Amino acid sequence: MSTLTDDTLPVPPRAMRDEMVAFGIMAVLLAIVPLTGIYPFFVMQALCFALLACAFNLLVGYGGLLSFGHAMFLGTAGYVSAHALKVWALPPELGIIIGTAAACGLAVITGYISIRRQGIYFSMITLALSQLLYFIYLQAPFTHGEDGIQGIPQGFLFGVFNLAKSTVLYYVVLGGFLGGFLLIYRTINSPFGEVLKSIRENEPRAISLGYKTDQYKLLAFILSGTLAGFAGSLKVFVAQNASLTDVHWSMSGEIVLMTLVGGLGTVFGPVVGAFIIIAMQQYLAGYGQWVTVIQGVIFVACVLTFRRGIIGEVARLLRRSL
């Protein structure tokens, strides 16, 4: 029987100190963005996808469960939040809560179905469920089909913060991202996270130790899907629309790409990967369909050059935990 790897051991104090210092630097840099003249929409969009990639990394990087359908949580939360804001005229905080709750409910149902299978079968089931929802949303009246839900009102958060102001909206999105990031960080460094890592490394051994692995994997799937939905609800206020793009299988592919480029199983890798991919889409938009080709070339280069991802290689060179 093989032993568990070092990745399943509790994080030493030095590693936690390195990660908290890195978090502090990241938070400060993101907080001063409105003072730098950087286009705020780009950063807000990147923050939403960074939280989405971190949620996906929790599932695949620490649980070993590769999902090809995480776009369904992003899109479902976006549609529900958009409908609640525009049709039901609910305040922003309730719109976010309802959208996130819808993603959580969907994660419970899809997780219960897919978690019974392992490996590529699990991945294919999540892809099939995601595509099923895509065609449901294509035909459902409340989603408006290919037109999507447009012109979503931003409103006042808690009746005080005017989200129509870009600076206010930026700090709300930043607060949501940092809160979600810290929740994920606490999860992976908790006893639950250590068990999850042991299941990733050697599930038969975890079972022999008395752990009900299916329950742990289901909880990880639900938490990951819920946080992905939270990112989708925040994205509605940034883009002011909800469309089929967020539910399509290609979006799930982009999530995988962000995580792998940044560094699978690293704390900050998905954040860096999300910013790189969104930056390419933003600043290479003039090349049209060639953006996909350029992304593919960069992805191949990263896989061949940075086997651990960008942050994974940086952490190895600096001998620091990132």
Image (spheres, rainbow, N blue to C red):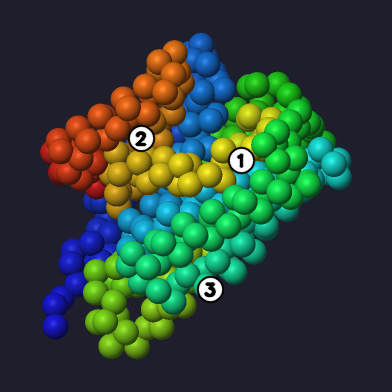
Q: Is 93 located above or below residue 125 in the figure?
A: above
Q: Please indicate whether residue 165 sits to the left or right of residue 155 in the image.
A: left
Q: Please tell me the numbered disc located at residue 272.
A: 2
Label 3 crowd (10 A; few <14 / some 14-19 / many >=20):
some
The x, y position of residue 37, in whole percent, is 51, 11
The alpha-carbon separation of the residues under discs 3 and 1 comes to 25 Å
Q: Mark 1 vs mark 2: which is more N-terminal? A: 1
Image quadrant where one finds the C terminus: top left
Local SS, label 3: helix
Q: Are marks 3 and 2 in contact (CB under 8 Å)?
A: no
Tell me which residue sits at (23%, 62%) in the image.
Answer: 7
Q: Position of residue 115 (x, y in %)?
A: 45, 72
Work out whether residue 127 or residue 60 is closer to the camera in this orientation and state it: 127
Disc 1 packing (10 Å; few <14; some 14–19; many ≥20)? many
Compare residues 297 and 37 and report the one nearer the observer: 297
Q: Is residue 42 left or right of residue 257?
A: right
Q: Please state if 305 lies on the left or on the right of 225 as rendered.
A: left
Q: Amino acid at mark 3?
A: Tyr
Viewer-nearest residue: 251 or 230: 251
Quick check: 139 left or right of 88? left
Q: Which residue is mark 1?
A: 244
> Marks 3/2: CA distance?
31 Å
Q: Are marks 3 and 1 in contact (CB under 8 Å)?
A: no
Q: What amino acid is found at the position of numbered circle 1 in the picture? A: Leu
In front: mark 3 or mark 2?
Answer: 3
Residue 191 disc label = none
Disc 3 designates what residue? 112
